[in-house]
Amino acid sequence: MYHKEKSIQIKSSASALYNNLSILRIAPRCLTYFTVVHANVVNMVSASWDGLNYSHRQLQSKEGNVATSSSLIMQAAWCVLPSRDLLVLTSQKGIQMYESDGSIMVYWHALDTPETPTAKAVFARGIAAVREKYICVGVSSGSVLVFDVPSKGSNITLSEVLEEHKEAITDMASECSGNLECIADLVSADDSGRLCVWKSGEDFQLLNKIPGFDTSCSSVKLWKGTVIAGYGTGQIRLYEGVTGILHAEVNAHARWIYSLDIAPFTGLLISAAEDSWVRVWHLSLAAETNSVEIEHMYNECVTDTQICGAKFCDGDGYAFAVTGYDLSEIIRYTQA
């Protein structure tokens, strides 16, 4: 179904972080941007679709106006809003938002760090663009910060703080199918496996809390109202977002899942884990039962690699890319 393409080299290797790969397609310019986190640096690569031109940039962890910082970056992800695309970096010190090419930092939000050192680490992790103008970012305290983003300029404001999680946020996702009839448009996950399903607006509404089973939910997606969650147990669970009904449970991997992604136009789902396997699944809506079904489609073993990021390169799932701990390359696969 897929075959391996030429890898893209990166300046420094991938850290062992959940969801450690982000991709942005820039169709008018026939370019794809990739980002991979290494310690306090984000490796950014711009690749032309013909595979002939690559340009590299590295973004450093910062603290406000300080040029560089040693604080570790936890995640880097592009947020695509109707009016603009922003690259969001989360670290142990705060949240940085850049123009999509990484050229200009437009916003910095400092995290509340305790005066005296505590046993609990402080960091931000989990990034999602929601509807027309919101970017949501998770924090280690369990809070979800909602930022209101103008169509241009740097007048980004913290508009709301959502306080439903008790454990550190691991990942967040917005409704990716483009279906405006879906009531739920954001899901947040935490270290205990709890999922919170939200409806966005001037005031975000909590629609449902799906209990965890004391195992971390490391990656989550939202597609056509269905929550797709990957866990430290190697399982994938599919829930109806608003009701919390469990549609399916799959023992997908032998080790901790690090990354999920979905191709919204085709319903293809990719899962990747510490067990070196990347698996591609197909999700479909069964009309008669109105439930989501999952079917296994494809396997790829990236030998001796602890996979930490896997993303489709397009909305149809025609190609995907993979990163692994300590690998200084992005491995790409396209449909045969």
Image: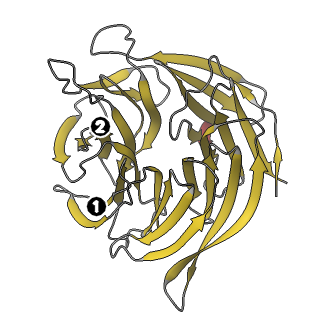
Tell me if 166 is positioned left or right of 100 in this view: left
Label ID, residue 168: none
Label 2 amino acid? Ser
Tell me if 322 is positioned left or right of 37 in this view: right
Q: Position of residue 220 (x, y in %)?
A: 46, 54
How many labels were placed on the picture? Answer: 2
Q: Position of residue 209 (x, y in %)?
A: 28, 65
Where's the N terminus, which quadrant? bottom right
Q: Nearer the viewer, mark 2 or mark 1?
A: 2
Residue that carries the numbered disc 1 in the rendered image: 198
Circle 2 crowding by C-alpha within 10 Å: few under 14, some 14–19, many from 20: many
Q: Residue furthest top?
A: 67
Residue at x-position 69% and y-position 55%: 279
Q: Quadrant of residue 240?
A: bottom left
Q: Earlier in the sequence, mark 2 or mark 1?
A: 2
Label 1 amino acid? Trp
How far apart are labels 2 and 1 at the CA level? Answer: 19 Å
Residue at x-position 31% and y-position 44%: 136
Q: What is the secondary structure assignment of the residue under circle 2? A: loop
Q: Position of residue 146 (x, y in %)?
A: 24, 44
Residue that carries the numbered disc 2 in the rendered image: 140
Tell me if 99 is positioned left or right of 58 in this view: left
